[in-house]
């Protein structure tokens, strides 16, 4: 069987429904929809690495964005490749790859593609998927080997873009000459090449309207292929303002390549509105992917897994964004597994349906996929196939780490309770996730004794990671604003 894994970045569980996401909802109607699926980390790279290894982030060693993925990890695409699968991926955000090839999750794939340096529109990703699928369908040298295809869609991830009629208000000037005018609400990437004389030069970004944010700026000598250093003399990267001025010097007449990524700074209500719009675009991309599989006659014979790497907060627990805590607006994600049609899968479908209302973790997904295609288990896997016996009081673990979060946090949960541990001060928080779904009332003082074993487990997890040194962060990840 062919395998398709679709991950929508930053997609909350409660953002998926029959009205707002009809494409995704239709997929769930034809598969098994899980109501209580949870990520292992509210960050993109740790969550994906965990999904592809069936290991917790502190076990993989990938606990924040920007870290290299250790080459010794057993990754699902590599394991499938060793068992006769062709493996390919198309990704939408630089968080998943490194500046150097085969240092991120791309190391696990025969063919790993992306469009833009930092952030790609999901509809562009879907088109790239269609091209990739055509090539996989043709096969190499006529082979009919099965394939594993991973699709990552980044649309709901911040920056939340506006798709209303553009209102160009931000000008980019070089030495007083306007070379671009754009609308920062659309989070544009500006790329320009131009010739400059030897000497000192000035670049200016300015607007008379609302504040904007310069997320990244690159200057390159085209002929030499080298970066040109610059000094920011007004404004700062990632801080809102209305003017950014940079100065730089070139020794000879040369062609300069300039690239910058600009966004605006929406209010929280506007951000939430745009997020919903971005979710709709991701859903349209998912619908396009499904339509392409059907057009190629591959839909009915393929396993399709759909999920999100993490959610997003919009004011819950006094927080916006993700990474910072371990509450369910960040951890609770949609999950659908669509099996091939035919009686041969009735039993597997029934077994999955038995788990649909129980807590399940991303670490369970790789073992489940391997179980479905009858490939031996992934070495080092911590999760369990959802095709196995029904689990009682199943435990799910998640974590987040500095510097993305302000402190390290670990949690364990089951169907009724959730325990969060703060290693820096030794504090625990306990929430009744059945009666207090918003996780507003800490009941550790009165009920902590109900999960004493968890307290020891969480201390042991934190201790195993304590003192570990983070790797150098990637310039691409810095460009994303992490």
Image (cartoon, grey):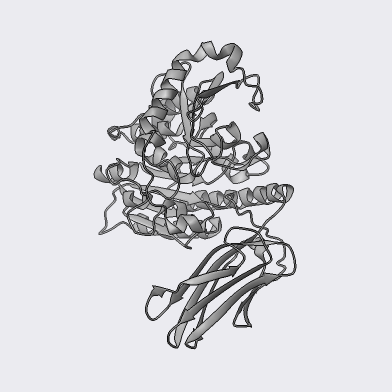
Instruction: Please report the residue visible at 29 percent of the width from the left and 45 percent of the height from the top.
Output: 78
Left or right: 72, with 236 as reference point: left
Question: In which quadrant is the N terminus drawn?
Answer: top left
In this view, the residue in front, 377 or 131, is 377
Instruction: Please report the residue visible at 49 percent of the width from the left and 88 percent of the height from the top.
Output: 197
In this view, the residue in front, 150 or 299, is 150
Q: Position of residue 382 (x, y in %)?
A: 35, 29
Left or right: 28, with 276 as reference point: left
Q: Is residue 116 above or below residue 404?
A: below
In this view, the residue in front, 32 or 261, is 261
Q: Quadrant of residue 224?
A: bottom left
Left or right: 363, with 289 as reference point: left
Q: Position of residue 156 (x, y in %)?
A: 59, 49
Q: Position of residue 330 (x, y in %)?
A: 57, 37
Instruction: Please report the residue visible at 62 percent of the width from the left and 48 percent of the height from the top.
Output: 279
Instruction: Please report the residue visible at 70 percent of the width from the left and 67 percent of the height from the top.
Output: 166
């Amino acid at each position: 069987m062919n395998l398709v894994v679709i991950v929508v970045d930053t997609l909350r569980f409660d953002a998926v429904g029959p009205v707002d996401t009809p494409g995704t909802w239709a997929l769930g109607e034809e598969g098994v929809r899980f109501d209580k699926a949870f990520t292992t980390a509210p960050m993109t790279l740790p969550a994906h690495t965990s999904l592809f290894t069936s290991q917790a982030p502190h076990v993989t060693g990938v606990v924040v964005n920007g870290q290299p993925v250790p080459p010794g990890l057993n990754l699902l695409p590599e394991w499938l490749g060793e068992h006769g699968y062709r493996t390919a991926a198309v990704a939408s955000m630089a968080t998943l790859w490194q500046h150097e090839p085969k240092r991120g999750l791309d190391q696990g794939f025969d063919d790993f593609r992306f469009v833009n340096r930092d952030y790609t529109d999901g509809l562009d990703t879907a088109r790239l998927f269609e091209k990739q699928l055509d090539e996989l369908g043709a096969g190499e040298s006529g082979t009919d080997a099965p394939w594993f295809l991973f699709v990552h869609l980044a649309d709901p991830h911040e920056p939340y873009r506006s798709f209303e009629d553009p209102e160009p208000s931000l000008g980019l000037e070089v030495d007083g000459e306007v070379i671009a005018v754009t609308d920062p609400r659309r989070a544009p990437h500006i790329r320009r090449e131009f010739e400059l004389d030897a000497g000192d030069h000035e670049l200016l970004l300015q607007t008379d309207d609302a504040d904007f944010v310069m997320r990244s700026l690159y200057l390159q000598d085209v002929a030499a292929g080298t970066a040109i250093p610059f000094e920011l003399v007004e404004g700062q990267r990632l801080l809102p303002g209305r003017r950014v001025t940079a100065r730089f010097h070139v020794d000879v007449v040369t062609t300069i390549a300039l690239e910058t990524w600009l966004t605006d700074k929406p209010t929280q209500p506007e951000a939430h509105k745009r997020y919903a719009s971005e979710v709709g675009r991701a859903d349209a991309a998912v619908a396009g992917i499904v339509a392409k599989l059907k057009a190629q006659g591959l839909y009915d014979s393929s396993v399709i897994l759909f999920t999100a790497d993490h959610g997003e907060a919009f004011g819950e627990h006094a927080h916006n964004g993700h990474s910072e805590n371990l509450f369910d607006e960040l951890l609770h994600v949609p999950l659908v597994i669509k099996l091939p049609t035919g009686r041969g899968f009735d039993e597997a479908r029934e077994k999955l349906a038995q788990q649909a209302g129980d807590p399940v973790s991303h670490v369970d997904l790789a073992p489940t996929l391997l179980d479905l295609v009858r490939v031996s288990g992934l070495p080092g896997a911590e999760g369990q196939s959802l095709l196995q016996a029904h689990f009682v009081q199943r435990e799910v673990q998640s974590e987040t780490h500095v510097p993305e979060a302000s402190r390290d946090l670990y949690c364990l949960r089951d169907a009724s309770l959730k325990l969060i541990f703060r290693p820096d001060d030794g504090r625990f928080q306990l929430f009744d996730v059945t009666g207090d779904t918003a996780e507003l009332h800490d009941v550790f003082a009165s009920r902590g004794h109900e999960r004493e074993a968890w307290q020891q487990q969480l201390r042991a997890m934190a201790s195993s990671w304590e003192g570990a040194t983070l790797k150098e962060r990637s310039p691409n990840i810095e460009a994303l604003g992490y």
